[in-house]
Image (cartoon, grey):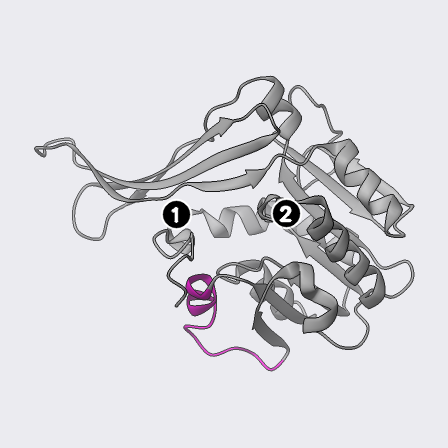
Amino acid sequence: MKQDDPYSRVDYRRLVAWPERIEREWPFLSRVLGPSGRVLDLGSGTGEHSRLLASRGFEVVGIDSSAAMLAKATDTPLPPNLTFLEGDIAEVERLTAGWFDGALCVGNTLPHLRRLPALARLFAGLRARLRPGAPLLLQVLNYDKVIDGGQRYLPLNFRRDEKEGEIVFLRLMTPRPDGTVVFTPSTLRYRPGGDPALEVVATRNVELAGWRRPDLEEALEASGFPRREVYGTVGDVPFDPERSPDLVIVAR
């Protein structure tokens, strides 16, 4: 495992309410991606979206740079229509072969590409791998709201601890004047009757690029994705730069 893997200390499989999230997102994913096909899951993480799509008949290739995430994604047997690759998503053209019928990059993965050349390389690679008219679904946090509004944290997640008390998933953010954001995912153990009552289990700083809507749309246009729909979450909800939790773009 890479020593600098920023997510080796955070168990996203336990700390995200995956069944509820998948059920909420599936109608939109199904409408965008269609009934079947060969799909890329960029920044596949612990593999929940990839496994969902594979279970619905898609042939899925998931790519992630985190060895820790991929270890979780592959800790149970994979179906024959699901493959995971370790690598930089900006190198998608080099890492994969053949045509794809769609791609998704969700869960705030895109801001890990902190420079415009890497973003442009990703979009150019996808333009080379996606069939004409195939959808590219992007989801990031609404960085207009985060940066302009000075948003400092995401909602807390609570999970029952296997040992005692509760596990609290805390995600702090510090926007910078240059448009980058220091993201601090942290896992805490909360024991109301304990001493101390709160224990830091794991924490790590990750520097992200606060990609705004014009940044992404300009890069997509330059890479050959002229048709775009914009939403405020993974669902049919209009985007509001001041209120939407997310920025979602479906590009073709």
Please tell me which of labels 1 and 2 falls first in the chain. 1
Residue 46 in the image, given as x and y percentages of width and height: 48, 60
Distance CA(mark 1)–CA(mark 2) = 20 Å
Q: Kindly identify which residue carries mark 1.
A: 15
Residue 67 in the image, given as x and y percentages of width and height: 45, 66
Tell which of 98 and 235 is nearer to you.
98
Residue 59 in the image, given as x and y percentages of width and height: 69, 73
Quarter of image, res 229: top right
Tell which of 238 and 20 is nearer to you.
238
Q: Residues within 10 Å of mark 1 (few under 14, many from 20)?
A: some
Q: Residues within 10 Å of mark 2 (few under 14, many from 20)?
A: many
Q: Determine the residue positioned at 76% across, 42% down.
A: 249
Q: Secondary structure at mark 2?
A: helix
Q: Kindly identify which residue carries mark 2.
A: 110
**Is residue 150 rendered magenta in the image?**
no
Q: Secondary structure at mark 1?
A: helix
Specify the amino acid type for callout 1. Leu
Asked if residue 89 is positioned above or below residue 220 in the image, the reply reads below
Quarter of image, res 141: top right
Q: Which residues are magenta?
A: 67-80
The answer to whether the residue labelled 1 contacts the one labelled 2, judged by CB atoms less than 8 Å apart, is no
Q: If the image is split into quadrants, where does the N terminus sit?
A: bottom left
Tell which of 182 and 195 is nearer to you.
182
Specify the amino acid type for callout 2. Leu
| For discs 1 and 2, the disc positioned in front in the rendered view | 2
